[in-house]
Image (spheres, grey):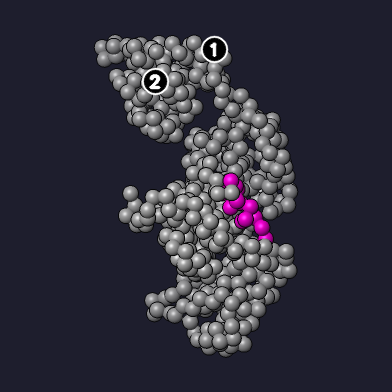
Amino acid sequence: MNPNAPNHPPGHGHVTFLGAGPGDPGLLTLRAVEALGAADVLIADPQVLDVVRTHVRPGVAADAQGTPEQARADASSSTADVALLRDTANLVMGAARSGKRVVRAVAGDPGLDGYAADEMVACAAEGIVFEVVPGVAAAVGVPAYAGVPLRDAQGTDVRFVDARTADDRCWSEVGSSDATAVVSATLETVAAAAGELVAAGRKPDTPLTVTVAGTTTRQRTWTATLGSIAQVLKAAKVLPSPQGAQPVIAVVGERSAAAQREQLAWFESKPLFGWHVLVPRTKEQAASLSDQLRSYGAVPSEVPTIAVEPPRTPQQMERAVKGLVTGRYEWIAFTSVNAVKAVREKFEEYGLDARAFAGIKVAAVGEQTAKSLIDFGVKPDLVPSGEQSAAGLLEDWPPYDPVFDPIDRVFLPRADIATETLVAGLIELGWEVDDVTAYRTVRASPPPAETREAIKGGGFDAVLFTSSSTVRNLVGIAGKPHNVTVIACIGPATAKTAEEHGLRVDVLSPEPSVHKLAEALAEFGAARRRAATQAGEPVTRPSERRPGSRRRARS
């Protein structure tokens, strides 16, 4: 039990006012995730709804009126009517009165949200128990992601200003001081806020930075001065724009100087910052790969190209699993995560668990397969020390020794389209192999029309091909990636298949590993960024370049 959780009588409602941070889902606190997981009702500001709802239990309960609360939250958060969005006190208290655990998620920190404070007062007036879970305030988190420190070793004063509510006295106090000013504004009002500071006494050549969509992969920062910011935004073709109402954080003072930011802009200088990368694998297969891509600043999109189905005739698989229990095998070799899943499902069907592997040696073709086995409760005895492939597994596989191996048989559960490399190699080492079809791979259904158009129209910056079948299947279900899209392949065979389909391969992994492939793509992105910087050109994503202007890439 969480010692910080409030103690309230059973059957009584409770409200958690939760700060969801400025946009990066990784900035949610552990306490915030815990509160969301226990929520019956979620009511969120629109800009953080996607950040918080992934942590809410599926199928949340309905309120007293019978409206699903998650749907209600979505509906209330999609409107552009700010007054309607902010008038949520009755909704919050209505759910709490009915005994629900309500999470009211706000952008940034609830302590800096005046509307949240009003809702807290309303709850207190009715005797509704509530708690506050602080979050990372946008005024602090966004400058940190923009590479703009707010204080120095001399202890510079910091003043926070909301341009929407600042009066003449506020502007006068901030303008007449030399403190670092952190101004919350919008794209279309930030120049006016700069003018207020100049009118109050700040010099027009005072540096400032303006950051939009801070802490997300859409983040963009401009460096200017108080006197030039309007021209800088106009030259960048940011204004005039229908998106002029987007919130921005402006930092005014020497801390935001361009030279300082060039050294400290850690987030926007990530090698794949803002790249939309297509990962043609299932969500389960792509999870760790997508996490790695996000660490490089990319936005991964997972598009399954194959679907996994049971074998047409399950009897062979059933006999092999029974043989595991009766001691028929010395080894079992897993060549994919799907093979682990197939055996695990068959175990569960028979009421077995990981203990059935007692006395059997277990091999895994690579790290991801080994991880899925560990999640099942089985620690593999053999994982290739070199190349993570059937060939790499054979290099480390011991030959059959009748003195030390009482049984000479290996159980190999695998896909229906797997190659014969491993079977032939094991036989050559003296082993008998039960080569069993554990699952079938079929071409997946086409992705949504929007995704297909993005693939063919150059909406993706890169695509990772992890096998020849992913090339064939992606082209078959969605079409050929556009010429501007960077093509990254896991090995020569996959690259050859890509070229046969008319694709120009830009990145070739040095090893047949999905993580080495992602690493190679990141190195390609970093080299591309360096080349643009050295040439004095703006750093752009591949999808922002004209067809035909792409340079032939190096692997």
**Residue drawn at (73%, 64%) of the image:** 242
* As drawn, 19 above or below 370: below
Instruction: Tell me which corner region of the image, top left, top right, bottom left or bottom right, holds residue 555.
Output: top right
- Nearest the viewer among 79 and 146 is 79
Q: Is residue 513 magenta?
A: no
Residue 144 coordinates in the image, percent (x, y): 48, 65
Q: Is residue 393 visible?
A: yes
State whether residue 440 is above or below residue 479. Answer: above
Asked if residue 74 lies in the magenta stretch, the reply is yes
Neighbour tally class for label 2: few under 14, some 14-19, many 20 plus, Cα within 10 Å: few
What residue do we see at 41% from left, 15% from top? 321
Q: Are marks 1 and 2 in contact (CB under 8 Å)?
A: no
Region of the chain picked out in magenta, as a range: 66-80
Q: Is residue 104 left or right of residue 410?
A: right
State which quadrant residue 235 falls in: bottom right
First along the sequence among labels 1 and 2: 1
Residue labelled with disc 2 = 351
The image shows residue 244 at horizontal and vertical percentages of: 69, 67
The residue identified by callout 1 is 313
Q: Residue at x 51, y 35 (%)?
A: 285
Q: Which of these two is toward me, 185 or 328?
A: 185
In space, the residues marked 1 and 2 are separated at their CA atoms by: 21 Å
Q: Between 508 and 320, which is closer to the camera in this rendering?
A: 320
